[in-house]
Image (cartoon, helix red, strand yellow):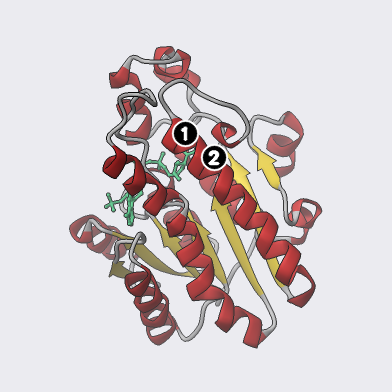
């Protein structure tokens, strides 16, 4: 698919799924804005991608930083067509009765409020231009409890509702909002899950995880008309039909 001239802002672009998504969108011809706290990592990736990439250091849990990141993207690339709400954290993994309340809240600030911040900052410009795509990385954890992941499950359930909300309020105004549940992916997050040793996900073999390149390819595909069947809903990358449509093995 060609995304030539399109501008894509990707949160959590310093590694893992977000970094691969940046490479995939740039390869499809898009101009990319790389957002994360790790300024060295996004600067390095922007250097690798070249002139079509800009690195924008930002903590998505702070609305004023997200708002400025969107403004800087528009200044650098001349607009904003697609937002990928990808940034997220899993630590600290803890049972409900042991969880540190402040640390639990920080995960909500990133995984749930960060998605709201991305939508809140991008939607006014998208609505005034009459179009825009808002993709959010969801999780199977949104749909069922996973031991010691109360923060993560609650945040992903809320983030999925934000996709439904964006579609409900703006689906008829040119806004395409879709969530993507990737299954388990071979990234730093899975290393942290394995190290916790707590639940069945931590017992998986590394070979059970899909590569982040598959998720990146799916995100690019989600910008095309074939994915319109999923507007306001979630795509599961565990679904063989979806894999076939995307062209994955
Ligand atoms: N890996 C899996 O199996 C899996 C499965 C389902 C869903 N997901 C979801 O996929 C997304 C990406 O995860 P990943 O697997 O690629 O994990 P990862 O390798 O740990 O990457 C997480 C990314 O989020 C960024 N981030 C974290 N907090 C941030 C903040 N406050 N502000 C800005 N950026 C922040 C990190 O960058 P900095 O630390 O530099 O800020 C990093 O780039 C997450 O939403 C995750 O929940 C992953």
Residue 119 vs 136, above or below: the answer is below
Residue 182 found in image quarter? top right
Confirm whether residue 29 shows in the render. Answer: no
Does residue 221 appear left or right of residue 189 in this picture? right
Disc marking residue 214: 2
In depth, the one of 226 and 116 nearer the eye is: 116
Q: Residue at x 46, y 20 (%)?
A: 147
Q: Residue at x 60, y 28 (%)?
A: 144
User: Percent position (x, y) of residue 38?
Assistant: 23, 56
In depth, the one of 88 and 47 nearer the eye is: 88
User: Percent position (x, y) of residue 183?
Assistant: 56, 31
User: Percent position (x, y) of residue 217?
Assistant: 57, 48
Residue beneath label 1, please? 211
Quadrant location of the C terminus in the rendered image: top right
Q: Residue at x 30, y 61 (%)?
A: 59
User: Percent position (x, y) of residue 54?
Assistant: 33, 72
Q: Are marks 1 and 2 in contact (CB under 8 Å)?
A: yes
Disc marking residue 94: none
Residue 192 vs 82, above or below: the answer is above
Q: Secondary structure at mark 1?
A: loop
Does residue 154 appear left or right of residue 105 in this picture? right
Structural crowding at the residue carrying mark 2, measured as other residues with C-alpha within 10 Å and reported as few (<14), some (14–19) or many (≥20): many
Q: Secondary structure at mark 2?
A: helix
Confirm whether residue 1 shows in the render. Answer: yes
Does residue 2 appear left or right of residue 60 in this picture? right
Residue 92 vs 114, above or below: the answer is above
Quadrant location of the N terminus in the rendered image: bottom right
């Amino acid at each position: 698919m060609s995304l030539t001239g399109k501008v894509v802002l990707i949160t959590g672009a310093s590694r893992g799924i977000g970094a691969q998504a940046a490479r995939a969108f740039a390869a499809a011809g898009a101009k990319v804005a790389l957002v994360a706290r790790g300024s060295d990592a996004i600067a390095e990736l922007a250097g690798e991608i070249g002139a079509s990439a800009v690195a924008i250091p930002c903590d998505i849990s702070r609305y004023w930083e997200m708002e400025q990141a969107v403004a800087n993207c528009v200044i650098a690339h001349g607009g904003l067509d697609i937002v990928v709400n990808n940034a997220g954290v899993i630590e600290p993994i803890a049972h409900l009765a042991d969880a540190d309340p402040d640390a639990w809240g920080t995960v909500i600030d990133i995984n749930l409020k960060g998605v709201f911040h991305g939508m809140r900052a991008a939607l006014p410009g998208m609505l005034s231009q009459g179009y825009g795509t808002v993709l959010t990385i969801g999780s199977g954890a949104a749909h069922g409890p996973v031991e010691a992941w109360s923060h993560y499950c609650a945040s992903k359930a809320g983030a999925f509702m934000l996709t439904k909300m964006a579609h409900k309020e703006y689906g008829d105004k040119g806004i395409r909002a879709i969530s993507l549940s990737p299954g388990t992916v071979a990234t730093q997050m899975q290393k942290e899950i394995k190290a916790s040793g707590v639940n069945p996900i931590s017992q998986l073999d590394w070979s059970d995880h899909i590569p982040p390149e598959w998720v990146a390819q799916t995100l690019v595909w989600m910008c095309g008309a074939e994915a319109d069947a999923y507007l306001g809903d979630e795509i599961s990358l565990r679904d063989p039909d979806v894999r076939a449509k995307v062209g994955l093995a």
